[in-house]
Amino acid sequence: MKLLSLRATPLGLNTGVILIGCLLLIAFFGESLAPHDPNKMDLIRRLEGMSWTYPLGTDHLGRDVLSRLMSGTFLSLGAAVMTAISILFIAVPIGLISAMVGGVVNHLLMRITDIFLAFPMIIFSLVIIGFLGASLNSAIIGVALAWWPSLARLVYTLTTDALAKDFVLASRQCGIGPVKLVIRHILPQILPPLFVVMSLEMASILLVLSSLSFLGIGAQPPEAEWGAMLNEARPFFTERPGLLLAPGLLISLAVMGFNLLGEGIRHKLDNRSPFRW
Amino acid sequence: MRNFILQRMATAIPTLLGMSMLGFFMVALTPGDPVEMELRRLGVIFTADQIAALRQEYGLDQPIFKRYIDWLIRLLHLDMGQSIASGRSVLEEFKTHLPLTITLATLSLAFSIVLSALFGITAALTRSQALGNFVQFFSIFLVSIPSFWLALLLLFIFALSLQWISLLGSGAWYDLVLPVLTLSLGSAATMGRLMRDRILAVMSEDYIRLAIVKGLSPTLILRRHIMKSILPPLVTNWAVTFGALLGGSVIVENIFNLPGLGQMALQAVFERDFAILQAYLLFMGLIFFVSNFIADLLNYWLTPHFREQSGSQGGTE
């Protein structure tokens, strides 16, 4: 029986780790490593091609594309991380309470998640942004509000499974309080699988946030967020298509990194052996 | 079957009510008084008395629950108010923009189902390591590319380099080719990966092993055993994908400059046209809801022993 090679060799996982590692380095040190000031305009040298001074050329205001990309990494990844944290802040308590209290509360909370899930995700975020006014903060709130229900369901399922373990039952019979139970026994069980899922979700969050910025309803120029950079470069698509290449490639690499990381860990944990002809 | 439909309809009512509440309160609770905003837009200064009179005229002095009921009754009569920006009724705006978006999403769904089957089955069943890895990698690549960037790449290749199509669009049917391609490549990759995972999961089952030992041919096993067991979750996934495609159409319509619902909604975000946004949210929710409902019916039909399936399944995968 042959195993899938991608599954057997952690090549995908390694690539993911390396990609994310590099991006994190750039996110934290990019600002200081950037060859130029990302916001310094030079209107004489606008829309220039690659050169030694400007490795990736300049944009329509003569700003260095490479420096903008590097200093924008923190903002782009940071926004995605903030969104992920906001989602967890809503989803984990709701999922936990729903599973631990049960009964009417569970029914009510799950109904509410159902209602939120009834809308397509991007559309829900878009409408929330519409009411809040276009900005990166609105985008983060919009995406988090549209996203939490599926995670809340996952937390609920994980917690129900965790609660069914014998040692949890034993602790409960010993009279351990609910808060202590959650901290000591439930969280350690649900957090590892949750983080694997969050790594995959990070990829999608990054995609959605950059899409919103690209549409002009997320991060606003002159912020060097990748999606916003693409949006700014759009009018110059025919003139210098290369300007749209770099930010898009960087978004794709970051998304791919998170996807590979999540997939890799998931496959490592999964040890089924399907038959192969 | 009849019972099942009736039962599903009954459970749908609270969800639909909840959706309408969410849509209503989102507007009702938005900071900023609609009357004052309207007046500021007109640029006139009114006395406090006149504002109060206007509030009464719009029914804003009523308790919020009463306002919700009134609003719901008007909604059931398809009266969704007027667009502030264009002055036309929301219903009319929808009538102009809807066909394009529905065509786009439906074509993309059909195309991505075909593509995903191709991806999924190849990736799961191929004997060739190289081909399997290639399909796997290619699908991860497609999943990771933002759709707007893919669209720009396609435009770059077909409009700028090859000059097969015009950047501005020509109003003919083939304007839809690149948008459909953009939308379906991304979702086909996601769906194909799901399909591959499902097939591999079924392949670990004993009854497939038995079928192989019996000497059935791979195509027969695929058709008779594997397809039968993986189709229901896939159908559910198609409904979810349809919702994602409706959302994705916002981006694609924007790039290819197609006057669909997405463009309308995006415009409404910039103009803060709440009536349009509210109707858009509810309408898209309704379409998504109906597509999930159809998926449930299909699943019921596909699996005779299917009795209890908890509600509509959303989620990312």
Image (cartoon, coloured by chain):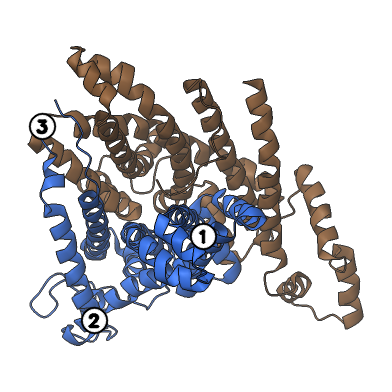
Chain colours: A blue, B brown
Is mark 2 in CB contact (under 8 Å) with mark 3? no
Q: Earlier in the sequence, mark 2 or mark 3?
A: 3
Q: Is residue B162 above or below residue B69?
A: above
Is mark 1 in CB contact (under 8 Å) with mark 2? no
- How far apart marks 2 and 3 lie (CA) works out to 45 Å
Give the tally of numbered discs: 3
At x 20% / y 18%, what residue is drawn? B212
The picture places residue B217, in percent across and down from the top left corner, at 19, 13
Which chain is indicated by disc 2? A
Q: Earlier in the sequence, mark 1 or mark 2?
A: 2
The disc labelled 2 sits on which kind of residue? Phe
At x 21% / y 44%, what residue is drawn? A271
Q: Residues within 10 Å of mark 1 (few under 14, many from 20)?
A: many
Disc 1 and disc 2 on one polypeptide chain: yes
The one of A262 and A70 positioned closer to us in this rendering: A262
- Residue wearing tag 3: A1
The disc labelled 1 sits on which kind of residue? Gly
The one of A269 and A184 positioned closer to us in this rendering: A184
Quarter location, residue A52? bottom left
Q: Which mark is residue A28?
A: 2
Which chain is indicated by disc 1? A
Q: Earlier in the sequence, mark 3 or mark 1?
A: 3
Mark 1 or mark 2: which is in front? 1
The picture places residue A144, in percent across and down from the top left corner, at 48, 65
Which chain is indicated by disc 3? A
